[in-house]
Image (cartoon, helix red, strand yellow):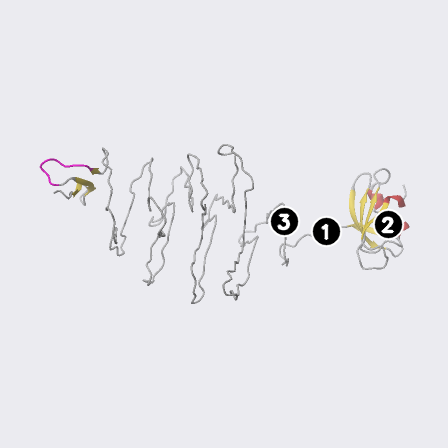
């Protein structure tokens, strides 16, 4: 079959011939010619004066369709398949702003013995110059706002996560982190706060009803497993819900501590440290001197109402009262250095 001018339509670009603008054309024939016939040399000769090298023709035949690029209009119109150039994963691209409505999926090809950074954000912060203006600088920011709600049961209401990272380990690895954050101080500096991770949980005056198994926490850690964990060498490794490796060597001017809880004047807190155990717990507090210098197991400063509030339930570590022949009114059960049972006697004000 032959070319039909009725099926040819210019859909974009300049109408004036001889310009540098790429023109877009459409040739649609789903009843007579195969695609292989449409893209043969001289098929579009009827439009040889209108077509220019570089023009794109959306070709549709009875069996298939294709984007074709005009390569010659000297004697005959010649076209070849137009293939969009792929993004070079090793090249650098500069964009002022990129807006995505359906998200982005990165599936890079990994290469053994090669470091990989699918997303690499690096820029210089020149410092604030406007007095009274607080400048925010982010490498990555996510904001999710709930605009509707429902009263479905637990497990059917959805999960809101600003960031999620899943790490699957199945073999040998040095370290595995779902999230890794590190701060550097590269010179003498003045700052207000320096955190490897800063979490703010703000409820304002809004009431929250928790489910029976719920919790609200700045950091939620769940350690799950049934398999054994062993340690080679000297065996000092531990499995812990939170691990702090303190490598500061300077006796600083300010106080230092492994964990610090600060309470403003108007705040209220039931327990700074609490353990609720239904399973097997060996030590609520374990202090071990492996060769260093430990001065106090517990240090109490300033006014405290009581040192310890013991429950008098049967089987607890504290016995409520002694016999008539003794002068103490309570005793705390301990294990003596030789491993036998012993007691710390507690005297009331009346004795």
Comes first in the chain, label 1 or label 3: 1
Q: Name the residue under label 2.
A: 41
Count of numbered labels shown in the rendering: 3
Whether residue 144 sits left or right of residue 346 in the image: it is right
Element on which disc 3 rests: loop
Magenta stretch: dominant secondary structure: loop
Q: Where residue 206 sits in the image (x, y, percent)?
A: 46, 43
Report if residue 3 is visible in the image: no
Location of the N terminus by quadrant is top right
Q: Mark 1 points at which residue?
A: 84
Give the magenta-colored segment's residue range: 319-327
Q: How crowded is mark 3: few (under 14 residues within 10 Å), some or many (20 or more)?
A: few
* Nearest to viewer (mark 2 / mark 3): 3
Q: Which residue is drawn at 14% across and 37% down?
A: 322
Q: Camera-side residue: 288 or 322?
A: 322
Q: Residues within 10 Å of mark 2 (few under 14, many from 20)?
A: some
Location of the C terminus by quadrant is top left
Q: Mark 1 and mark 3 in contact? Answer it, CB < 8 Å.
A: no
* Nearest to viewer (mark 1 / mark 3): 3
Report if residue 46 is visible in the image: yes
Whether residue 267 sits left or right of residue 41 in the image: it is left
Q: Alpha carbon of mark 2 to alpha carbon of mark 1: how far?
A: 22 Å
Q: Alpha carbon of mark 2 to alpha carbon of mark 3: how far?
A: 41 Å
Q: Mark 2 and mark 3 in contact? Answer it, CB < 8 Å.
A: no
- Quarter of the view holding residue 240: top left
* Residue 165, magenta (yes or no): no
Q: Where residue 19 sits in the image (x, y, percent)?
A: 83, 59
Q: Camera-side residue: 232 or 104?
A: 104
Comes first in the chain, label 2 or label 3: 2
Q: Name the residue under label 3.
A: 100
Q: Residue at x 56, y 57 (%)?
A: 121
């Amino acid at each position: 079959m032959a070319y039909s001018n009725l099926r040819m339509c210019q859909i974009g670009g300049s109408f004036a011939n001889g310009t540098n603008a790429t023109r877009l054309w459409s040739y649609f024939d789903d009843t007579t010619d195969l695609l292989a016939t449409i893209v043969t040399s001289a098929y579009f000769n009827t439009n040889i004066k209108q077509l220019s090298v570089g023009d794109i023709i959306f070709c549709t035949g009875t069996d298939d369709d294709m984007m074709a690029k005009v390569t010659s209009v000297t004697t005959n119109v010649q076209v070849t398949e137009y293939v969009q150039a792929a993004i070079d994963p090793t090249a650098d691209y500069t964009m002022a702003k990129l807006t995505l409505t359906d998200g982005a999926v990165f599936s890079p090809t990994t290469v053994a013995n090669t470091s990989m950074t699918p997303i690499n954000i690096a820029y210089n912060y020149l410092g604030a110059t406007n007095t009274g203006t607080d400048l925010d600088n982010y490498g990555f920011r996510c904001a999710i706002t709930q605009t509707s709600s429902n009263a479905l049961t637990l497990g059917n209401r959805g999960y809101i996560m600003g960031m999620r990272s899943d790490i699957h380990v199945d073999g040998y690895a040095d370290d595995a982190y779902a999230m890794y954050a590190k701060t550097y101080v590269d010179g003498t500096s003045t700052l207000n706060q320096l955190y490897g991770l800063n979490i703010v949980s703000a409820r304002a005056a809004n009431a929250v009803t928790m489910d029976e198994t719920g919790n609200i926490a700045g950091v939620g850690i769940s350690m799950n497993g049934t398999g054994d964990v062993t340690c080679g060498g000297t065996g000092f490794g531990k499995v812990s819900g939170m691990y702090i490796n303190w490598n500061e060597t300077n006796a600083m001017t300010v106080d230092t501590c492994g964990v610090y809880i600060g309470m403003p004047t108007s705040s209220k807190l039931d327990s700074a440290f609490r353990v609720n155990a239904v399973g097997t717990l060996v030590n609520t507090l374990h202090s071990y001197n492996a060769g260093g210098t430990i001065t106090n197991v517990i240090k109490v400063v300033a006014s405290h109402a009581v040192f310890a509030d013991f429950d008098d339930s049967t089987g607890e570590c504290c016995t409520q009262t002694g016999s008539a022949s003794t002068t103490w009114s309570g005793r705390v059960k301990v294990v003596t250095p030789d491993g036998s049972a012993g007691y710390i006697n507690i005297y009331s004000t009346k004795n």
